[in-house]
Amino acid sequence: MNKLRALISGAGIAGPSLAQWLCRYGFEPTLIERAPVFRSGGYMIDVWGVGFDILERYDLLEAARQRGYVFDRLKFVDELGADKSVVGGDVFRRALGGRFFSIPRGELARVIHETVESRVEVLYGTFIQTLHQHRDGIEVELSSGETRQFDVVIGADGLHSRVRELSFGPESGFATNLGYRAASFIADGYPHRDEGAYVSFARPGRQVSRYAMRENRSAFLFVFADAGHTPPGVHDSHGQKELIRTRFANDGWEVPEMLGRLEVAQDLYFDTVSQIRMPHWTSGRIALVGDAAHCPSLLAGAGAAFAMLGAYVLAQELYRADGNAFQAFPAYERRLQPYMVHQQHSAARFAGSFAPKTALGIRIRDAALNLMKVPAVGTLLVRSMFGNTFPLPLE
């Protein structure tokens, strides 16, 4: 087996996932991460379908479940906190055969990272300055000033990928804005808990949700319609908080309390809800994986699963090709790209139903959720929305 030297940019979910498999196959991955330390924050994600399958293949299912949550109901409330629509978690578990749970994105990343942190060189506070492909490899200049040689470079650096920009062109050529922005943060000691429930309040074009976590913490997710034209000052957390306050200023329920917690939030996630659509994910010795290649959008809820799946398929193809990127990379695209194109189309349709932009859309969404209480209807709807599967190649 060729001792492939791989530089992986991004130590979130896709990067460590790929590093784990490359280590198993005898390759030599190096991870770099722009952030100065491991990033543990993030919004709640659901694990089902291919996400459940791939965690089993990684031998990480039980570790993830221990850090995850099983919500027993999903509900929307009105301005006074009265229930408008409620769906029990049993609907999802019954339709999916119990193969469904939720986990904070940062906790899933930690579960994966722990499998490689003692086996792989990880450089935090580091990013790629330049890339130069040549006949025998790639010369990489790092932000530290150091220059290194690798056989391949993998961009696992997310929606705003540096590797993609250097190798394929600016983000504007591949990003499709789905018409929303999203923000998430975690706060301590929020008084309204509703243990085991995912609780949301919606007005036309905007929605806020909360869920109780362990250690008396609560997580919040704000989603609002937005054309994507960034107002002045929104590039820093102060401007981002101001924009959220403006959009939700007149809303009832607990929104004023949530905005108060937002004011002092230290670790705010804020971004457009976008997809990355590319005709090719590879170029010579360079490949993209995860959100950098095929981001389905935050609202799709399966980006982490698809990142792990992409890492698995890419590593498999490199193993089969004995480290030959010129054979492995096209095979990786052929195997995964049709599936991801289909998933992106589904995710784009789902965005409008997640946070409807009209009062009629909200009423239709609430009615559909209440219909899910009927077992046959609930099973049919859940399987149609969450029944994604992918034939995992054998090891």
Image (cartoon, rainbow, N blue to C red):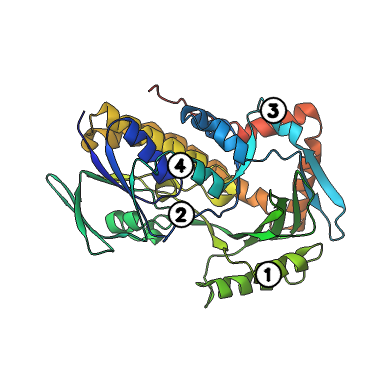
Q: For the N terminus, give its image quadrant.
A: top left
The relative height of residue 278 versus residue 383 in the rendered view (above or below) is: below
Q: Position of residue 149 (x, y in %)?
A: 18, 50
Q: Marks 3/4: CA distance? A: 32 Å
Going from the N terminus, do you reach mark 2 or mark 1 first? 2
Local SS, label 2: loop
**Residue 95: mark in rendering:** 3
Local SS, label 1: helix
Residue 369 seen anywhere in this rendered image of the structure: yes
Q: Nearer the viewer, residue 72 or 74?
A: 72
Going from the N terminus, do you reach mark 2 or mark 4 first? 2
Residue 337 seen anywhere in this rendered image of the structure: no
Q: For the C terminus, give its image quadrant.
A: top left
Which numbered disc, 3 or 4, marks the residue closer to the eye? 4
**Residue 55: mark in rendering:** none
Q: Tag 2: residue type? A: Phe
Local SS, label 3: helix
Tell me the residue that label 4 is attached to: 114
**Residue 38: mark in rendering:** 2
